[in-house]
Image (cartoon, rainbow, N blue to C red):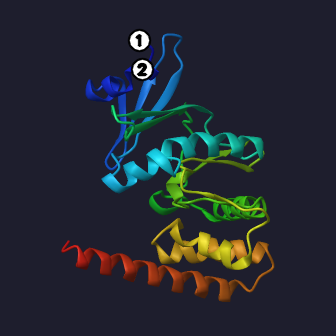
Amino acid sequence: MTLLERLPEVFSNNEGEIIYDKRNKIRRITLSDGRHIILKKYKKPNFFQRICYSTLWSNKAKKAYIFGNRLLFLGIDTPEPIASVTLYNNIGIVEEYYFLSTEDTRPDCRILRDGNMDNPQPLIDALSQYLIFLHQQGFLHGDTNLSNFLYEKKADGTYHFAVIDTNRSRFLHSPASKKEALSNLVRITHDRQLLSSIVHSYATQRQWNAEEAVKSVLRLLDKREKRKLLIKRLKGQ
């Protein structure tokens, strides 16, 4: 059997190396030729989602594959998609789905939040410039968490970035508006000081009013956190 045919067994037998094991599960597999690939098994959808994924919607694995190829076509670096696999039951209802890609071992931008950088400003400015590039391309990452931006520092001191976990993203038909762009920055981090620094750099580079941009994003973050807290209370958590 091929690897694509054995995906459920790979996870049930704990083959390879576990990378992430929470809502979704991610494993690193070494192929016979020594190459490493990443296998992602998405959380099993609820009944409503299973029906919609079987009839109306593309599931997250399909979107990850399609979006990954579209990003590469646009010149936006991301791990190369290999395949998406969807498993159905005997009446044609989606049971589970998987996404396979090449491995990218570059570190992510959580170093800005968790690391001990003597001077984080160059990376902040470079990340902000990269976010501007994405927005001007009409790409709105669906989860702009720092962990979803990988970086590499070049010999000349400049930075190169790549994006991961893009299945919830949006591709616009034109560059993102100011409102769309600022709204897209809210999920970067809950660390308000760091978020303010990133938004300030972003707005300054776009020649926008930086103070107003920071206030706008922080207001959106407050609303988002209050909404999440309310949902948790309603669920009794």
What amino acid is labelled 2 in the image? Glu
Residue 44 picture quarter:
top left
Q: How many numbered marks appear?
A: 2
Closest to the observer: 144 or 112? Answer: 144
| Residue bearing mark 2 | 5
From the top left corner, tell me how far across and down residue 76 is, in percent: 72, 47
- Residue occupying image coordinates x 44% and y 52%: 52
Q: Quadrant of the N terminus?
A: top left
- Residue occupying image coordinates x 57% and y 51%: 166
From the top left corner, tell me how far across and down residue 230 is, in percent: 31, 81
From the top left corner, tell me how far across and down residue 94 is, in percent: 39, 41
* Cβ atoms under marks 2 and 1 closer than 8 Å: yes
What amino acid is labelled 1 in the image? Met
- Residue occupying image coordinates x 78% and y 72%: 205
Q: Residues within 10 Å of mark 1 (few under 14, many from 20)?
A: few
Give the SS element for disc 2: helix
From the top left corner, tell me how far across and down residue 93 is, in percent: 37, 41
Up the image or down, 17 lies above or below 226; here it is: above
Closest to the observer: 217 or 105? Answer: 217
Up the image or down, 165 lies above or below 2; here it is: below
- Extreme-left residue of the structure: 236
Q: Residues within 10 Å of mark 2 (few under 14, many from 20)?
A: few
Closest to the observer: 212 or 101? Answer: 101
The image's mark for residue 1 is 1
- Residue occupying image coordinates x 36% and y 24%: 16
